[in-house]
Image (spheres, rainbow, N blue to C red):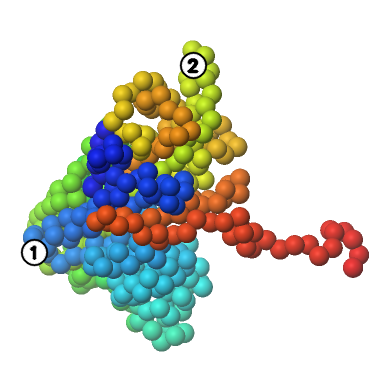
Amino acid sequence: MHFYGTSRVNGQGHLEIGGVDTVDLAAKYGTPLYVYDVALIRQRARAFKETFEQLGVHFQVAYASKAFSTIAMLQLAKEEGLSLDVVSGGELYTALAAEFPVDKIHFHGNNKSKEELEFALAANIGCIVVDNFYELDMLENLCKEKNQVMQILLRVTPGIEAHTHDYILTGQEDSKFGFDLQNGQAEAALKRALQSEYLHLLGLHCHIGSQIFETTGFILAAQKIVEKLSKWNKELEFSPSVLNLGGGFGVRYTHEDEPLSPAKYVEEIVKEVKVQAAKYELPMPEIWIEPGRSLVGEAGTTLYSIGSSKEVPNVRKYLAVNGGMSDNIRPALYDAKYEAVLANRPLAEIEETVSIAGKCCESGDMLIWDLPLPKSNDQDLLAVFCTGAYGYSMANNYNRIPRPPVVFVENGEAILVVKRETYEDLLRNDLRLSVGIGQEN
Ligand SMILES: *Cc1c(COP(=O)(O)O)cnc(C)c1O
């Protein structure tokens, strides 16, 4: 088994995280339960930041909060000196509730509403990453109305799409996000932004993909963007102060994943931007990155109780847990892979191969196919690793299953940071018909 962060097997032979016995956590808070290794989140945040510091460049490391947005998590991000990406009014609201420094909040999204832009202006956040002409117009009009200047980045699509193990070069990227760098859209947007007295253009942004295991894609993106910046520097006298290369740094979900270290991603990116800036005699911009899963993914573990099982002779054995696509939709959504152990006896001898089913009414609600496990029963707890990103944040109430609670563990202490939803919570927004539909009052 692979031990993430502070995970280890303790004296009782149980899985321990952050110095806390997971069997005790399950007894105290129930299952399913999301457990976060706070020390690991801190370690990852510091690794990104310290590498930039050592390389002597100006930078921001913005946590892409869509990966896991709760008040406590954003308080932790603030404590670690991170900046923050939000992509909706709800995420911005959460950031404000966490008293996140507003000047370090960046607002993303391909279809921000007028209300969301007004919210961002009223909060006076650090910058808005403008995605399209519609937004550019709307934002400028709102700023004018309020006589307020807003800092912006333009999101561009450099024609590079990075995937887990490869990347695709496309002349004209078929993406719903951003201004195309090659076909003149980005330049048109840049000219518009430069003309505006209400928009202060800081620079460009791109995000080439997620769960990326190489630096090639980032390097190609940096090359293409800096080349354009150099052109605009000469022709339009635009000197960018920020180059934001997005997130997408890979994590280890299973033994098949071999991500680079945070330091390696940062080193390679900074090296390339320095080379490109020197080549085109551009002043070195600030470099911003936006890690989401690489900050919180490996730090999260989900604890489940094992329930029913079903043997399909000569085919497979299904083992069901008391959660599933309601707390982790990634396997159903994009065939995501995970590893797991029995939390109460992680080192017990492997005796069979089982497939872990969720409890939702969907055949596709499978968490893990073909997992080697000891023989287990309903006294056992299953710990699924690396569920910290896009787990809780994508959790839902399908089948009216209440969302699980979240516990932070660190230095032998556990803190409940999100309560378990109750059946009452599920009905919070339901309104009762006072008379039957179609009946007269
Ligand atoms: C999703 C997203 C990220 C974070 O991606 P991860 O794979 O979680 O690191 C960063 N920037 C933008 C613009 C995104 O949409």
The residue lying at 28 percent from left, 31 percent from top is 347
Q: Position of residue 215 (x, y in %)?
A: 20, 45
The foreground one among 205 and 125 is 125
Residue projecting furthest to the front: 12
Q: Which mark is residue 315?
A: 2
Q: Residues within 10 Å of mark 1 (few under 14, many from 20)?
A: few
The residue lying at 43 percent from left, 51 percent from top is 28
The residue lying at 49 percent from left, 12 percent from top is 314
Report, in whole angstroms, how far the alpha carbon at label 2 lies from the one at label 1: 57 Å
Q: Is residue 168 visible?
A: no
Q: Which mark is residue 191?
A: none
Dividing the picture into quarters, in which one does residue 367 lie? top left
User: Could you tell me the amino acid type at mark 2?
Assistant: Val
User: Could you tell me the amino acid type at mark 1?
Assistant: Gly
Q: Is residue 355 left or right of residue 229?
A: right
Q: Quadrant of the C terminus?
A: bottom right
Q: Quadrant of the N terminus?
A: top left
Residue hosting label 1: 56
Q: Position of residue 56 (x, y in %)?
A: 8, 64
Of helix, strand and loop, which one carries label 2? loop
Of helix, strand and loop, which one carries label 1? loop
Q: In front: mark 2 or mark 1?
A: 2
The foreground one among 143 and 227 is 143
Q: Is residue 277 left or right of residue 20?
A: left
